[in-house]
Structures are given as C-alpha cells and as structure tokens.
Image (cartoon, rainbow, N blue to C red):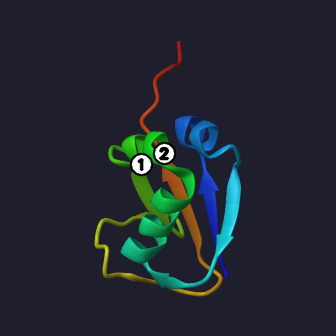
Amino acid sequence: MVRVRLFAALRDAAGTSEVQLTAAPLGELLDGLRDRFGPRFTEVLGYASVMVDGERRTDPAAQVADGAEVALLPPFSGGA
C-alpha cells in the first residue's frame, strides 16, 4: 500500500488527512484521488506540490512503489 498524506486545503477538501492506496503510477494515484474527493480537491491539487518519499515528483508515469509515502502540499503562507 501507498500512504498518501493530505495537508491544509487538500485535507479540508478531502475531509481526511491520510488515505491508503494500492501502488500505481503517480498519475493514476492522483486521478483516483480527484475522482474520490471531487472538484474542490481537484482545484487545489492543480497547484499543489507532490512529494514521494521526500522528493518532489511531476512525472505522472513514475511508478509509486508499495510502501512509499506521498505527501500533497498546497502552497501556504505564514510565519513572522
């Protein structure tokens, strides 16, 4: 299984902070999340960073291996 962690607006749109998915190419994983969580999630995902095991990924054909962690991080602001 692949652990997908959702942060900030993506977490709010999905109503959960984490889901487990079967290993697949990155594009398939993201398409499944779009289908599952709907238009607001899809909108925010369009400008989010996708990290796989701590490294930014953009290639939808890249295989996400069993046991990997995917983090979806929308842009955020803050600080002092």
The residue carrying mark 2 is: 41
In the depicted structure, whether residue 52 falls above or below residue 48: below
SS type, badge 2: helix
Question: Left or right: where does residue 25 sit relative to residue 33?
Answer: left
The residue carrying mark 1 is: 42
**Residue 25, labelled with which disc?**
none
Q: How many marks?
A: 2
Looking at the image, which residue is at 54% across and 70% down? Answer: 53
Q: Report which quarter residue 57 is drawn in.
A: bottom left
Q: Nearer the viewer, residue 54 or 27?
A: 27
Q: Amino acid at mark 1?
A: Thr
SS type, badge 1: helix
Q: Whole-percent x and y of residue 60?
A: 31, 73
Looking at the image, which residue is at 33% across and 47% down? Answer: 46
User: Label 1 crowding class (10 Å Cα cut-off): few <14, some 14-19, many 20+?
Assistant: many
The quarter of the picture where the N terminus appears is bottom right
In the depicted structure, whether residue 34 falls above or below residue 7: below
Q: Whole-percent x and y of residue 7?
A: 59, 43
Looking at the image, which residue is at 33% across and 43% down? Answer: 47
Q: Whole-percent x and y of residue 13?
A: 57, 40
Q: Mark 2 to mark 1: distance in Å?
A: 4 Å
User: Label 2 crowding class (10 Å Cα cut-off): few <14, some 14-19, many 20+?
Assistant: many
In the depicted structure, whether residue 15 falls above or below residue 52: above
Give yes or no for contact between labels 2 and 1 (Cβ–Cβ under 8 Å): yes
Q: Nearer the viewer, residue 58 or 31?
A: 31
- Name the outermost residue toward the top: 80
Q: Amino acid at mark 2?
A: Phe
Q: Whole-percent x and y of residue 30?
A: 44, 65
Looking at the image, which residue is at 46% across and 39% down? Answer: 40
